[in-house]
Image (tube, grey):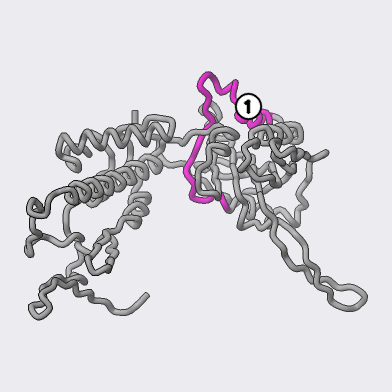
Amino acid sequence: MSATTATKIRFTSAAATRLVLAKIGNPQREEPLQTSKKVFVVADEDTGALTSLFVKPFKSLAGYRFSHHSSLDQHEMNQCAKAIFETPEGLLEKGCDIAKRLYSKSNHPNIKAGDLCVALVDNVEVNGDLVQAICILKSESVVPFLSISTKDGDLHLHTEQGINPEKIDKGCLILNHQSKKGYYVLTFDRSGSDSRFWVRDFLGVVAITDSPFLTNKFANMAVAFTKEEEKTKKKEKAKQAPEEREEESDDAPPPWESASVAKDAMSYFEEKEQFSLQEFEEQVLRTPEAVEKFRKHKEKVEEEQGQRFDESFEISKKDVSKAKKRISTVVKLDTGVEIHVKPGFADQEDPVLERGFDEDKGMKFIKVFFNGEV
């Protein structure tokens, strides 16, 4: 089975219209839950600015979907979303249900209290169609800000506490798209941990294995696999007796020109339109030992992700470019100097790195050519 192509989302026409608010404490610390008594209707003059703040964090995120081991009918968040999309007038009740669910999942001592906003957003464009969306944002911190006002003919400065829109801690955007498959869900967690609490316990989502997702995963796996192999080789070499180690030849290719799984993998992704795991193994990994190790690495990643990956899919060229930018070669020298080399240096017609040997010092050297510092 091949992966689905990328879902195109645009927020040009999006408009946040109604909100349900809540303050979410931590039950373990006996902090309360407080929810809205009525729906807050966004004023027309505030719609543009508020909508922009709500949807900004969700640009360029990977897609997820609700998942349940038995049936989506048993998935609480899926059912809340379905009810809101079918009957928007029920936003208050279901929005409060979402707040109650988050509160019940917030009993770990490390989970911070915060402010919750559940908003109904109209006219989000998904693959050319306009759909509704439910935006869920949680802010776990407030920041001071200054306000200047006029009073009695003079100007006064006030200090207040509020939410910084640039630092919303956690968020989720549920799009009324692919409803039978668990909807199309975008989510983020600023903690950087992709926390089990937010993604699995509260939302109950798994990644959608579309073309961008799989391109990213396999490219990243190839790079991570290469780094692990390099570490293993260095450890094995370190264990060898000095007389057993092979002397480095002066004619040996420099590290930035040496063939590697990472470089070969990027070349494969750039040249091909369709990914095939079998072809990838034959052309990039080559040896049975490397294939076996890569498959074990893949199984480990799949276990962490909670799902198996397709072995054939359309390659996302945009994501190949992103992955390539993350690859660099680090040349570590025994003098304490490290040189970080980004991809593409070895392919230049006029190389900017040159190796040699200084007879007077009796040491090797690397010469670096450049036009200016950046």
Quadrant where the C terminus lies? Answer: bottom left
Occupied quadrant, residue 38? top right
Q: Position of residue 127 (x, y in %)?
A: 50, 42
Report the magenta residues as a range.
57-86
Q: Give above or below for 187 relative to 367.
A: above
* Location of residue 293 in the rendering, given as x and y in whole percent from the top left corner: 24, 36
Q: In this view, does 355 lie to the left or right of 175?
A: left
Quadrant location of residue 302?
top left
Decide if residue 235 is on the left or right side of residue 308: left
Residue 146 point in image, percent of width and height: 75, 68
- Which of 132/260 is in front? 260
Determine whether, in the image, residue 308 is placed left or right of residue 75.
left
Let me know if residue 76 is in the magenta part.
yes
Q: Is residue 291 above or below residue 248?
A: above
Residue shown at 55% from the left, 50% from the top: 190
Which secondary structure, mark 1?
A: helix
Dot 1 amino acid type: Glu
Nearer-the-camera pick, 335 or 374: 335
Residue at the spot of label 1: 76
Image point (12%, 51%), residue name: 241
The one of 293 and 359 positioned closer to us in this rendering: 359
Q: Which class describes the residues within 10 Å of circle 1: few (<14), some (14-19), or many (20+)?
A: some
